[in-house]
Structure formats: C-alpha cells, structure tokens
Amino acid sequence: MNELPTMTQTEAKALVDSIRACFGACLCQQYATAPGLGKVWIDVCEGHAFLNEPHRLARLLWVRRTRDSWETAEHVLTPSQKLSRLLEEQVAEIVDRD
C-alpha cells in the first residue's frame, strides 16, 4: 500500500469542509433518497468515493501544501500576459533611448 503523507489537523479540517461544501454531509452506510429511485442504500457517498480514487488524497495534499507557490505573481500570469509585459518593457527601453 502507498505511504501517504500525514495530514495536519488544519489540512484534515479543510478537506472535510471542502467535501461537505461540494457533496453535503457524509451518507456512507445509510439510506438516502435518490431522484427517480426513491430510497437507496449508499455504500460509499460521492465525497468518499471521490477520495478513494487512486492517489487522489496524495494529489490533494500536494496541491494544498504547494498552493502558495502557485499563487505568486510568477505563476498567476498567463503566457500572453508575460509576453505583453516583455513587449512593454522593450518598448519602454526604445522610447527611453531616443
């Protein structure tokens, strides 16, 4: 079995909160009403099925732990924005030279 990095208490709470926001409360091992089917037994709810995909939890932890680096200005710029900035800098150099 894969060794996953352990979650901090803050990471675990944030993960549970995001699952609840997306999928609602956990319905594992309960009956729930499904549209067109009436009451059905839920072995694994959507939130936990989402986490049970291979390597899903490891990816979520990696994204959470590296989020700050992706939010810096270097990563926020799109390639077209980077090109625009480069062109502006070059035009400014030409104008300043003349």
Image: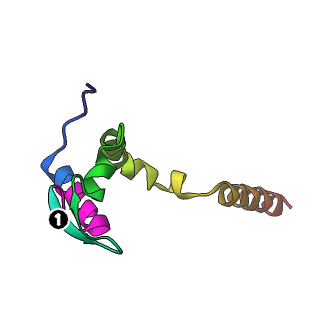
Asked if residue 53 is positioned above or below residue 34 in the image, the reply reads above
Left or right of 64 in this view: 27 = left
Q: Magenta span covers which residues?
A: 13-28
Residue 44, position in %: x, y? Answer: 24, 52
Residue 20 magenta-drawn?
A: yes
Q: Residue at x 67, y 54 (%)?
A: 79
Residue 88, position in %: x, y? Answer: 74, 62
Query: In the rendered image, which quarter contains the C terminus?
Result: bottom right
Name the residue at the right extreme.
Answer: 98
Q: Check disc 1 and report its element: helix, strand or loop.
A: strand
Query: In the rendered image, which quarter contains the N terminus?
Result: top left
Residue beneath disc 1? 31
Left or right of 50 in this view: 69 = right
Q: Residue at x 35, y 42 (%)?
A: 53
Where is residue 35, by image quadrant? bottom left
Residue 59, position in %: x, y? Answer: 37, 42
Q: Residue at x 21, y 52 (%)?
A: 43
Left or right of 50 in this view: 9 = left
Where is residue 80, by image quadrant? bottom right
Q: What residue type is disc 1 on?
A: Tyr
Could you tell me what secondary structure mostly forms the magenta stretch? helix
